[in-house]
Image (tube, coloured by chain):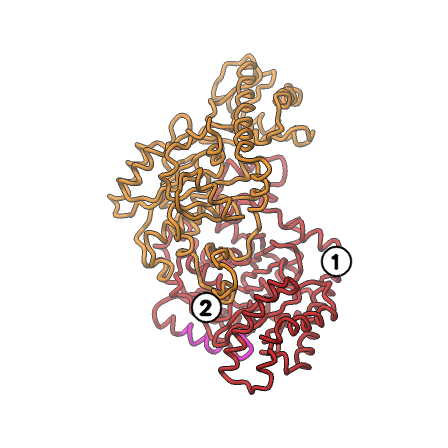
Chain colours: A orange, B red
Amino acid sequence: MENVVLKKMREYLGFIHGDSILAPGGSISNMYAVMGARHKMFPNYKKLGLKALPQLVLYTSIDSHYSAMGAAASCGIGTDHVIQIDVDEIGRMRVDKLEEAVLATKAKGHVPFFVNCTCGTTVVGAFDQINPIADLCQKYGMWLHIDAAWGGGVLLSRKHRHLMAGIERANSVTWNPHKLMGTHLQCSTIHFRQDGILLGCNQMCAEYLFQQDKHYDVSFDTGDKVPQCGRHNDIFKLWLMWRARGTDGFEEHIDHLFEMSDYLVQRIKEMPDKFHLIQEPQMVNVLFWYIPERLRDQPQSKERVAELGRITAQLKARMMNTGTLMITYQPIRELPNFFRNIVSNSAVTKDDIEFLLAEMDRLGHDL
Amino acid sequence: MENVVLKKMREYLGFIHGDSILAPGGSISNMYAVMGARHKMFPNYKKLGLKALPQLVLYTSIDSHYSAMGAAASCGIGTDHVIQIDVDEIGRMRVDKLEEAVLATKAKGHVPFFVNCTCGTTVVGAFDQINPIADLCQKYGMWLHIDAAWGGGVLLSRKHRHLMAGIERANSVTWNPHKLMGTHLQCSTIHFRQDGILLGCNQMCAEYLFQQDKHYDVSFDTGDKVPQCGRHNDIFKLWLMWRARGTDGFEEHIDHLFEMSDYLVQRIKEMPDKFHLIQEPQMVNVLFWYIPERLRDQPQSKERVAELGRITAQLKARMMNTGTLMITYQPIRELPNFFRNIVSNSAVTKDDIEFLLAEMDRLGHDL
């Protein structure tokens, strides 16, 4: 089941060979990618440990998931050696700044090692531009990892897969079907373009567990490819779902989520007194503030934005106490708290979107 | 739920304060222990990475689980710096050899760092002696980790908890309720005697996920304590089970497993022509060979043992093809393949044990 489903996913990535495995979450997937890259570049590391390596440097955007930082801490690169690259106005890693950072690393005598390119950033849902980043990776000999934990699902939609143009050039890809594809939590995958890296990196050859003299094809024993031993059988949910929905079903699902998000954006724009859209979404992350009555006639200012941030937390508390809505909120960079709505359920209709907006107004108008 | 159950487990460990979390498997738990120990000894490591550390050395017995090796590879210690200590005749780490190895490490200018003491080794089910090992850890300033993934459950039995005497002296303990306690796969826990290490080690302070201005007690947001982000809700099964069975129920369960294993050992000894017990078990791992008719009147010899090893694999294939039995087998050290029977289900009765032995004889007598 794992073989069949993971091979199918690799086809969407454009990986002809390659290897994949399920991991306990996107963060650990990203860690496995760092381990794989390190093993590929420094195969002695497994035996010799940290003394075998020069100082490696990892690049990721300031909007990327914190697990890039976590992987660097766990794997011994150190968070000081994770360079966080600025993003452009829609949240994509700035490729010019990336090259500047690589040159600065080389000038210091350190080794540019790993670029974490995010397809679907957590908050904004931005897609870093794969092709120009892949060009830089090629130029400087760096590993290209795509963290598509959130965005990976768009590959299944002919209409939206252009967001990940160049994906076939990645060395490794994290893709969580439990996100955009709607598989039940948890179902996280990591894919490598080159076969054999996982096994080379993690195999400990525990003879007492992975005997080679069994009476069946032992290549089905995939346990030695990851630092885990016992594993959840998370593939079954995805396999069953794929059988039931088919690829067309997934495509419809993804397209529907985008349509519903577009509808939410359209409705927010139609009520500029009550809602403020923070930016045009690239994906299904819709970022906005709710504006209570007392602030509706005020012009936008630093003070008003700060007040909208406070209102966001207050309105969320009202939602949770009432129990009718639950929308996540967070700050980013210089912006205070705002709502981030994600449509991830096929069953959501335009009526639900209308309810959401009306209910926010009912709960929040007097804040 | 997590707080309640994990606190209760810490009570059985004799940890008055401390902290715990669920992990995706015992191997990752052991890795978290190495990370916690490294963070405690070298708090700068998280920021500075591998350049901040001297060469660390980790000790574990030759019979321990391969994840000690895996953690060393992943965390940058290097498998060359994992010293595998010999075991005594019943599979326990030799404490004299451990001290010798520590002295040799110091003579080299390396740092004795971490002792992985196993309670319930994978194959033999041996319990390393905690107290004398803890004395050495104290003497040389090493972190004492107990890998009780397999054996941890004995703590719930007044009759058998003596196997883990000294457990309260550990710095960290891996304990998988999905093993001896019979919780559904997967349910793995890692415990630290000192509070705050997990958060200090792994926290990345992702503001956009772990906001501090929520309207409830944010100490319930435990996500930032581990390198994972999304996590399986594995505690629910254990919480429910504990509510349903009670502590007495767990005790009865554990005691029953030991009784059934004792019965199997007794029956094997009563049929020395057909079965050969490899060693007296400390726990529920019962190790034995099946002897087919043609080998019954031969004296034990190197050739006969090798032949019994081959027969083990053949008989296992017959079991799987017939579908009536499934008993695991493996080699260890100089011994070829043998059967390792584990009773882990409360519902097993003496009749099942009788069936197991009779069925092996039916399937294997002409091998």
Residue highlighted by disc 2: B59
Residue A123: % across, % down = 49, 32
The picture places residue B342, in percent across and down from the top left corner, at 63, 67
**Quadrant housing residue B258:** bottom right
Task: Provide the chain ID for the residue under circle 1.
Answer: B
Q: Residues within 10 Å of mark 1 (few under 14, many from 20)?
A: few
Q: Could you say which quadrant of the image residue A260 lies in? A: top right
Q: Residue at x 34, y 56 (%)?
A: A43
The question of residue B341 being in magenta is answered with: no
Tag count in the figure? Answer: 2
Mark 2 and mark 1: Cα distance apart in space: 37 Å
Q: Quadrant of the C terminus of chain A?
A: top right
Residue drawn at x 67%, y 51% as measured from the top left:
B237
Q: Which residue is mark 1?
A: B246
Res. A136 visible in picture = yes
Residue toward you, B281 or B231: B281
The amino acid type found where label 2 is placed reads Tyr
Q: Is residue B90 magenta?
A: yes
Q: Is residue B284 above or below residue A35?
A: below
> At which x and y percent is residue B163?
62, 72
**Residue B164: in sight, yes or no?**
no
Q: Earlier in the sequence, mark 2 or mark 1?
A: 2
Question: Where, by quadrant of the figure, is residue B147 drawn?
Answer: bottom right
The reply to the same-chain question for discs 2 and 1 is: yes
- Front-most of residues B156 and B338: B338
Kindly identify the amino acid type of the residue bearing the numbered disc 1.
Gly
Q: Secondary structure at mark 1?
A: helix
Kindly indicate whether the residue at mark 1 contacts the one at mark 2 (C-beta within 8 angstroms).
no
* Stretch of the chain drawn in magenta: B89-103
